[in-house]
Image: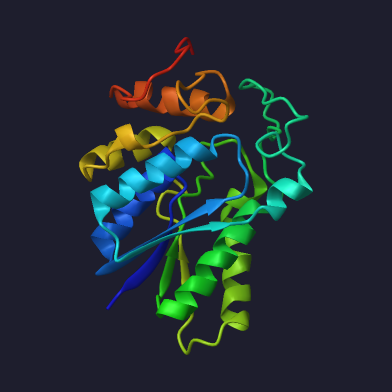
Amino acid sequence: MRRAVVLVSGGMDSLVAAAIAVKECEEVNFLHIDYGQTTMSKEAECFEAMCVHYMPKRSKTIKMMWLSEIGGSALTDESMQIEDHSELNEIPNTYVPFRNANLIGAAVSWAEVINASRVYIGAVEEDSSGYPDCREDFFRALQLAIGKGTKTPNPIMISTPVLHMSKAQIVKKGLELGAPFQHSWSCYRDNQIACGTCDSCYLRLKAFREAGIHDPIPYKNQGI
């Protein structure tokens, strides 16, 4: 049986990665991480809705509050202001230091326990904010560490099915797979109505516009 642990943040990219995992695997198990992020309550709501939609074998939410205790990101540090999208090609201050390594580490640990052979994550490199832990060479290096640091006879493989897709391609793939975009959330600022101007909102709105598809979630500002 191809059994997978799927990291499900509640966002658009992880939703489509989950939809792909459901298609590729006989069994999926959804994992959500609470690290004190600004929109955790909305992300948790979306995660629960995705679980209802896809009916994973198991679902689990775990806390990694040390990421907010460490700080260094506008998503976890209230003293830092979340910036609007910028065209300066700089990594935005919403980058959470080494977050994906921590998330994948938790997913791999659970995968060992339940004997899963894959860990899915909806990281995007091609059309994204440029976070260093969303790059192919990062996942390649982490894959080597997983092979060295786990006891399973066969390595637990990291699957990044949307890594080299554009955001518009991700939207189209999600539509093809029937992904419930109404149950996803991308805004970094608000838990009720998406701001429309933070980096994540900007990229999402641009993606839906380029794909020619209506985004079903509400926005305060859609003027990109």
Whole-percent x, y for residue 12 in the image: 41, 39
Whole-percent x, y for residue 76 in the image: 68, 39
Query: In the shown orientation, is residue 198 left or right of residue 110?
Result: right
Count of numbered marks: 0
Q: Which is nearer the eye, 83 or 58?
A: 58
- The answer, for residue 165, to whether it is visible in the render is no
In this picture, is 32 found above or below 108? above
Give the residue drawn at x 53%, y 25%: 190
In this picture, is 92 found above or below 83? below
Query: In the shown orientation, is residue 182 left or right of residue 31?
Result: left
Whole-percent x, y for residue 175 in the image: 24, 37
Residue 59 position by quadrant: bottom left
In this picture, is 44 found above or below 21? above
Give the residue drawn at x 29%, y 61%: 56
Give the residue drawn at x 41%, y 78%: 114
Q: Which is nearer the eye, 165 or 145?
A: 145
Residue 74 position by quadrant: top right
Query: In the shown orientation, is residue 203 left or right of residue 81?
Result: left
Whole-percent x, y for residue 128 in the image: 54, 37
- The answer, for residue 71, to whether it is visible in the render is yes
- Please state, as top left, top right, bottom left or bottom right, where the N terminus lies in the image: bottom left
Give the residue drawn at x 66%, y 48%: 132
